[in-house]
Image: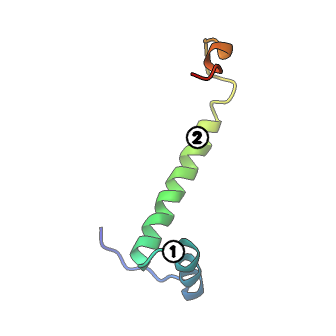
Amino acid sequence: MRTNVVVDDKLMASALKVSGLKTKKDAIEEGLRLLVQVKRQKKIKGFRGKLKWSGNLDAMRIDK
């Protein structure tokens, strides 16, 4: 999808520097991926204590 955005120059420079990414497009796409990942993780946390699990932890913990 093509779009035009105005991004703070200092923010973009910092993002490129700390990420090691080469292009502004890469930085924006990586930022969007991270946003989606974080939001999905928050949804998963909502299931805490609500899902039933059955299994044998002791058997699972044995190194094979």
Residue 20: give its label: 1
Which secondary structure, mark 1?
A: loop
Neighbour tally class for label 2: few under 14, some 14-19, many 20 plus, Cα within 10 Å:
few
Q: Amino acid at mark 1?
A: Gly
Up the image or down, 55 lies above or below 6; here it is above
Measured from the top left, where is residue 4 in percent x and y? 37, 79
Mark 1 or mark 2, earlier in chain: 1
Q: Position of residue 49 (x, y in %)?
A: 69, 24
| Res 61 quadrant in image | top right
- Outermost residue, bottom direction? 9
The crowd level at tag 1 (other Cα within 10 Å; few <14, some 14-19, many 20+) is few
Residue at 51% across, 82% down: 7
Residue at 56 percent of width and 80 percent of height:
17
Total residue callouts = 2
Q: Indicate whether 43 appears above or below 15.
A: above
Q: Position of residue 27 (x, y in %)?
A: 47, 72
The circle drawn on residue 52 is: none
Residue 43 in which image quadrant:
top right
Direction front: furthest residue: 64
Quadrant housing the N terminus: bottom left
Query: In terms of secondary structure, where does tag 2 sit?
Result: helix
Judged left or right of residue 1, residue 33 is right
Residue beneath disc 2: 43
Relative to the observer, which residue lies in front, 53 or 60? 60
Residue sitting at the far left: 1
Amino acid carrying label 2: it is Lys
In space, the residues marked 1 and 2 are separated at their CA atoms by: 30 Å
Whether the residues at callouts 1 and 2 have beta carbons within 8 Å, the answer is no
Left/right of residue 40 with respect to residue 22 in the rendered view: right
Q: Residue at x 62, y 30 (%)?
A: 47
Of the 4 image quadrants, the one containing the C terminus is top right
Name which residue lies at 55% across and 84% down.
Answer: 13
